[in-house]
Amino acid sequence: MREFTFTTPESTDRALAEAHHGTGSGGRGSGRDGGAAYLAGGTTLVDLMKLGVLAPSRVIDINGLPLHGIRADEHGLRIGALERMGDVAADVRVRERYPVLAEALLASASQQIRNMASMGGNLLQRTRCPYFRDPGAPCNRRDPGSGCPAVTGHHRNHAVLGTSDACIAAHPSDLAVALVALDASVRVLGPGRDGDKNRDGDRGRGSGSRTVLLADLHRLPGDTPHIETSLRPGELITEITVPPLPRGTRSGYLKIRDRQSYEFALCSAAVALSLRGNTITGARVAVGGVGTKPWRLPAVEAALTGRPATESVYEKAAGHAAEGARPLRQNRFKVTLVQRAVVRALMSLGD
């Protein structure tokens, strides 16, 4: 692990200023060589620093910032970015109103890690691709232009949707899949520029604030897989917002993996159905473990809406789940798996 400067800013503005000062050649506050990195739970950052994958020159501990709280009302759910995953999963309002979110959190990592990991940090966790995590191996995400050995090497756990010749790594977050299905968004703050609105709504220099849909937070790899999100340099996620679900909506999360606990998804499905009688009036479906980002399935949703909630309808709709897939030899099974996972997740809502 390389030497770095460690700071504990007492205000959000100070944290943003330090991140802006330390973005360096890595840009986007990513913690690459010479960059700055925010530290919350540290369950990803510290591991990657120990491995030598990340080498930030400045680590900014944000745990003292006022980015906590869980608020639920008729307008939806608001979660501070520093809330711990375990606390959100245990919140009665989350469990009763958004079961898909609670189930996705409980399927993530281990109890010990959930007690440490922050909600915002989980959304920004890095891929578990073994080539990315090995500093001695080429990897376009870690070292742009060096190549993607997973394409011809070991890729059983990798993505089949949203891939490119430059990267086929699957996105690892269960939480992000559930939030994409729920049309959630994040509030972010960044070092202000002339003309930005600060937190008080005034224009001028200060902390620039904006809202980013979860569906737009993570980027497809294309030919720039090292740019993983739409966050600007030094920006900080401060809050997650989930809109209210229609009354009577049923939701759930299914995770398929090689072992029952402490394992990343081979495939997962977050589903929510709104019903009038036995007719589906609204559907939300997103999948994980198979995409380079959390993957929403609008074609599946359209095939469900207006139809009866039956297994045959689910099976026909799930036939659209792998549209556009580009499987390779070792992960071809995921094409069938994602279709079956969607059906299983939908069927579980009637249990």
Image: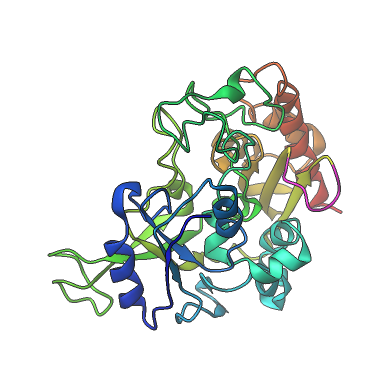
Q: Is residue 268 visible?
A: yes
Image-based side of 177 in relation to 213, left or right: right
Say which quarter of the image contains residue 106.
bottom right
The residue depicted at 65 percent of the width and 39 percent of the height is 304
Front residue of 40/256: it is 40
Q: Relative to 93, is 152 above or below?
A: above
174 magenta-colored = no
Residue 274 location (% of width, % of height): 65, 54
Q: Residue at x 79, y 53 (%)?
A: 262
Instruction: State the colouring used for the structure image.
Output: rainbow
Residue 269: which quarter of the image? Answer: top right
Magenta residues span: 259-265
Considering only vertical position in the picture, is 223 above or below 256? Answer: above
Q: Nearer the viewer, residue 19 or 165?
A: 19
Where residue 18 appears, as percent x and y from the top left, is 32, 69
Task: Report the magenta stretch's main SS.
Answer: loop
Can residue 209 be seen here? The reply is no
From the viewer's perspective, is 257 left or right of 164? right
Q: Position of residue 253 (x, y in %)?
A: 73, 52
The total of numbered circles placed on residues is: 0
Q: Position of residue 114 (x, y in %)?
A: 70, 66
190 or 89, nearer to the observer: 190
Residue in the image at 45% along x and 26% along y? 146
Where is the C terminus found, in terms of image quarters? bottom right
Report whether 256 appears left or right of 44. Answer: right
Occupied quadrant, residue 332: top right
Compare residues 167 and 50 and report the one nearer the observer.
50
